[in-house]
Image: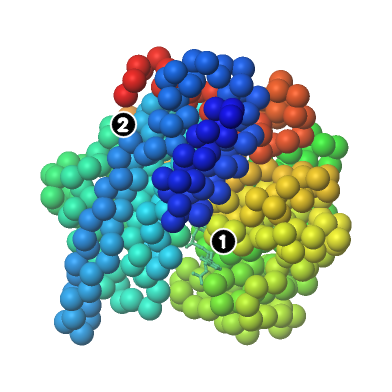
């Protein structure tokens, strides 16, 4: 049995109840076969793949807090410190009822390669809780965040592990988490990214994942003789990533016509209006039905459906496994020629394969959405320097990073005889740096 197959079998046995983690490991190891086979003897002797697929540390803790009725609630808290070979652990915190250890292991594993691809010195981690911020008062969210940080603060630090936001964790939550860290540890340091501008945040961090997604998509299209100019774009999600992807799509001359949340989706033939979307989702924290009320031509549909809309480019920006084989077939049938993942692993394995075999340009999330973590690393640099850069300075660095990421993965795919396979290219380019650092640091 090949080394890759051996490790995949072990991962499936050891993590049988964690389907998302197995899915992520399978996707990565399958596409690394050529690279692993070229160094099989050394990697096998050093158990490199076993170490790469096992988190350095998983922390699980209890998060008790008191709700507005005086009732004590208890949630699970987690931090997965996956790999620190190339820098301190870095990766978001997700607050969503679906959060469990398997989901965070998949996200932490992906983060290792993503962070490596940015070219910046950051390792991979991920954390969060099954707490649902939806429908909670500000006081309840603060009580939860303070309890969560009371435990988490023992394991993180500016040079150890630097969390950021993710689903359900935005500026409000980062503020409460930072306040509690500072209070307990008595350290004013860059322990979290995505902070507010008044206390160490970076300009352009809020926009970074969505903007970065579009910078990379634009470069991928240009390198394939196309542009975004005049193209119809479908976007899923209505959160941080989706909103700023929509904004940058407009700025690059495209027309984004959809967005969605966990209840339903919007088709706006005039193009999604960013100001209305921000007002509905960020200011009023309301449902997308409110968007349709404010825009007479927009249609609201319950459930899922953005992938049935005719488009040139599709950008899944909501959550994992939201674009399946049936959706991929609808996209191809409607003439979609490029898919770039704003969310983490939004496309199922069979859908990815179908899109690639149908000639659709496909860029995986670990490259396409790396702009968020890259800008988080720029926030860490500004915090260390005690300086703040201008929006333009951060945005231009972000653009350079995204263009470089695309060329790194494009070159890696070509070098290993898989031209145009950006999934393989991203995995190979991300892996080589981490594997090299792990080998140099001995058996740890
Ligand atoms: P937000 O919480 O801001 O937004 C998430 C959006 O997706 C919301 O519109 C939400 O709907 C919708 N959504 C969440 N879960 C589901 C579900 N199970 N089914 C349908 N819709 C769902 O999160 P972000 O925009 O920050 O994150 C989106 C994706 O991007 C995630 O995969 C995240 O890991 C990834 N990502 C985020 C980065 C960042 O910088 N924020 C960086 C890199 C990747 P509703 O409004 O109803 O909750």
| Residue named by callout 1 | 318
Report the front residue among 156 and 250: 156
Look at the image and tell me in which quarter the C terminus lies.
Answer: top left
Badge 1 local density, few (<14 within 10 Å), some, or many (20+)?
Answer: many
| Residue named by callout 2 | 384
Residue 50 image point, x, y percent? 43, 32
Quadrant of res 150: bottom left
Report the front residue among 338 and 38: 38
Residue at mark 1: C-beta within 8 A of ligand 1: yes
Sequence order check, earlier mark of 2 and 1: 1
Quadrant of res 221: top right
Question: As displayed, is residue 413 above or below residue 231?
Answer: above
| Residue at figure coordinates x 36%, y 31% from the top left | 84
Secondary element at image label 2: helix
Residue 156 image point, x, y percent? 25, 42
Instruction: Measure the C-alpha gap from mark 2 to mark 1.
Output: 32 Å
393 left or right of 195 in image = right
| Residue at figure coordinates x 66%, y 60% from the top left | 323
Q: Is residue 1 visible?
A: yes
């Amino acid at each position: 049995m090949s080394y890759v197959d051996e490790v995949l079998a072990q991962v499936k046995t050891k993590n049988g109840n964690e389907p998302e983690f197995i899915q992520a490991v399978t996707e990565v190891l399958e596409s690394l076969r050529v690279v692993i086979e070229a160094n099989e003897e050394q990697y096998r002797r050093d158990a490199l793949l076993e170490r790469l697929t096992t988190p350095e540390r998983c922390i699980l803790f209890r998060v008790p807090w008191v709700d507005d009725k005086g009732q004590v609630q208890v949630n699970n808290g987690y931090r997965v410190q996956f790999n620190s070979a190339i820098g301190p652990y870095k990766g978001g915190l997700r607050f969503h009822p679906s959060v469990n250890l398997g989901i965070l292991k998949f996200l932490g594993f992906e983060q290792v390669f993503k962070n490596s691809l940015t070219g910046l010195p950051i390792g991979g981690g991920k954390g969060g809780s099954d707490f649902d911020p939806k429908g909670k008062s500000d006081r309840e969210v603060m009580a939860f965040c303070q309890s969560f940080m009371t435990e988490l603060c023992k394991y993180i630090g500016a040079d150890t592990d630097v969390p950021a936001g993710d689903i359900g964790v935005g500026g409000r939550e980062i503020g409460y988490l930072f306040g509690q860290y500072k209070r307990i540890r008595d350290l004013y340091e860059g322990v979290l990214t995505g902070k507010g501008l008044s206390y160490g945040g970076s300009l352009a961090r809020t926009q970074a994942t969505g903007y970065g997604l579009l910078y990379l998509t634009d470069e991928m299209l240009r390198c394939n003789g196309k542009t975004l100019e005049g193209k119809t774009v479908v976007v899923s999600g209505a959160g941080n990533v989706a909103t700023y992807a929509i904004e940058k799509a407009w700025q690059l001359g495209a027309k984004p016509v959809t967005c969605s949340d966990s209840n339903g989706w919007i088709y706006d033939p005039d193009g999604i209006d960013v100001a209305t979307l921000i007002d509905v989702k960020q200011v009023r924290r309301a449902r997308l039905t409110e968007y349709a009320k404010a825009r007479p031509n927009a249609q609201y549909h319950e459930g899922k459906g953005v992938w049935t809309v005719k488009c040139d480019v599709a950008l899944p920006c909501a959550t994992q496994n939201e674009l399946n084989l049936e959706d991929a077939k609808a996209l191809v049938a409607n003439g979609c020629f490029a898919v770039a993942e704003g969310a983490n692993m939004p496309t199922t394995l069979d859908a990815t394969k179908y899109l690639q075999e149908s000639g659709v340009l496909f860029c995986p999330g670990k490259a396409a959405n790396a702009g968020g973590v890259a800008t988080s690393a720029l926030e860490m640099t500004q915090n260390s320097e005690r300086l703040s850069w201008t929006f333009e300075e951060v945005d231009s660095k972000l653009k350079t990073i995204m263009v470089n990421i695309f060329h790194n993965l494009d070159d890696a795919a070509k070098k290993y005889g898989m031209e145009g396979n950006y999934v393989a290219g991203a995995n190979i380019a991300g892996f080589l740096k981490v594997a090299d650092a792990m080998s140099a640091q001995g058996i740890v």
